[in-house]
Amino acid sequence: MPVEPQRTMSEIVDFRKAKDRYFGGDEHSPLTPEQRKRFSGLRYFAENPKLQFLLGVDEFPKDGKDEIQMATSSGDTVAHVRWAKLNFEVDGVAVALTVYRDLERNEYFLPFMDATTGDESYADGRYLDLPATGDGRLVVDFNYAYNPYCAYNPDWSCPIAPSENRLPVAIKAGEKIYPDASH
């Protein structure tokens, strides 16, 4: 169920402006120097408060927290732990996503694909980093869904959303496909 926004829409606008400044002007940007010269901003879905959730976590039992090797865009794999399941509704449709823990940084990671994947959003899915609330819940705000760096430049290697995180509904929030990708 959607919750009262934890972040205001102006915070999202400010976040997106800062990200555009980074992508267009920082030498560590995932964009190539040629792309940065042409860069005029990332494309986003309109902010959507209905795709902002504060969700209880169905943590897997200790023996169910499997370490998996997530496939990457470069053909390698990267280890993650299947940590918990999130259950929620989008436009009246019950859906579920698996949250992973990054073994290197020990952070909550939510790669996903949805009905916009490959058309309006990046073909290998988008990501969300999930802030914990300290009370057993996670903030899942799809307005902050972002493309992995490999969506812009094939020199990056990025995890591909596992099949268990492919939603049948459209998540029309967050970043859209980048038309000037270096592929």
Image: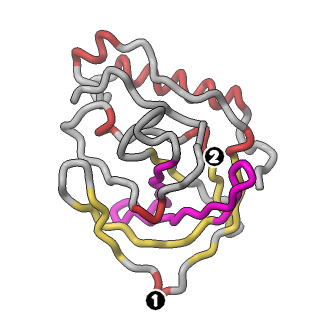
Residue 67 placement: quadrant: bottom left
As drawn, is 141 to the left or to the right of 178?
Answer: right
**Count of marks, rendered view:** 2
Q: Is residue 149 above or below residue 71?
A: above
- Residue occupying the point 51% across, 51% down: 129
- Give x and y (percent) for residue 154: 21, 36
Residue at disc 2, secondary structure: strand
Label 2 with label 1: CB-CB less than 8 Å? no
Asked if residue 37 lies left or right of residue 126, the reply is: left
Q: Residues within 10 Å of mark 1 (few under 14, many from 20)?
A: few
Task: Tell which residue pokes out farthest to the right in this image.
Answer: 4
In the image, residue 102 above or below residue 155: below
Q: In this orientation, which residue lies closer to the viewer: 114 or 22?
A: 114
In the image, is residue 66 part of the stretch drawn in magenta? no
Q: Which residue is mark 2?
A: 141
- Residues in magenta? 87-114
Q: Identify which residue is drawn at 63% across, 74% down.
A: 58
Mark 2 crowdedness (10 Å alpha carbons): few <14, some 14-19, many ≥20 = many
User: In the image, residue 12 lies at what x, y percent?
Assistant: 63, 31
- Residue indicated by mark 1: 63
- List x then y, in percent, for residue 120: 48, 32
Q: Quadrant of the C terminus?
A: top left
Q: Amino acid at mark 2?
A: Asp
Query: Residue 140 at what x, y percent from top left?
Result: 63, 52
**Drawn side of residue 107 relative to residue 156, left or right:** right
Which amino acid type corresponds to the residue marked 1 in the rendered image?
Answer: Asp
Tag of residue 156:
none
Q: Which image quadrant: the N terminus?
A: bottom right
